[in-house]
Amino acid sequence: MSRLVDTAAAQLGMGVKPATMRKWIQRGKLTRHGHDYRGRALVDLDEVEQILAARQAA
């Protein structure tokens, strides 16, 4: 089950800079799952956690 949140919530909750989140989406590392009513991209928190875990393991 995916946990979709807007990018602002993901950035605050996961401690990721806004520019980093935008770059992940642009580079295809992070999947955009549509937009919220404010036009912000929706992302899956599980996917963000996987990216952060892979970065820490490297």
Image: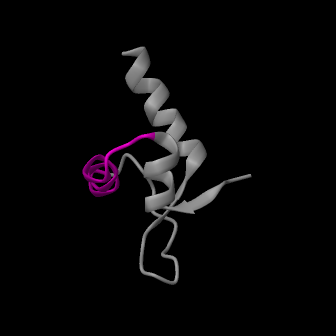
The reply to whether the magenta stretch includes residue 22 is yes
| Left-right relation of 5 to 41 | right
The reply to whether the magenta stretch includes residue 39 is no
Question: At 51% from the left edge and 57% from the top edge, which residue is drawn?
Answer: 9
The image shows residue 1 at horizontal and vertical percentages of: 74, 52
Question: At 60% from the left edge and 43% from the top edge, which residue is drawn?
Answer: 46
User: Is 1 placed above or below 46 here?
Assistant: below
- Give the position of the C terminus as an image quadrant: top left
- Please identify the residue farthest to the top as the structure is shown: 57
Q: How many numbered badges does the structure rendering display?
A: 0
Q: Which residues are magenta?
A: 15-27
The image shows residue 35 at horizontal and vertical percentages of: 48, 75
Overall secondary structure of the magenta stretch? helix
Question: At 57% from the left edge and 48% from the top edge, which residue is drawn?
Answer: 45
User: Is 48 placed above or below 31 here?
Assistant: above
The image shows residue 14 at horizontal and vertical percentages of: 49, 41
User: Is 32 placed above or below 35 here?
Assistant: above
| Left-right relation of 31 to 22 | right
Nearer to me, 27 or 46: 46
User: Is 20 placed above or below 22 here?
Assistant: above
Question: At 43% from the left edge and 50% from the top edge, which residue is drawn?
Answer: 11
| Coloring basis for residues | one colour
- Please identify the residue farthest to the bottom as the structure is shown: 37
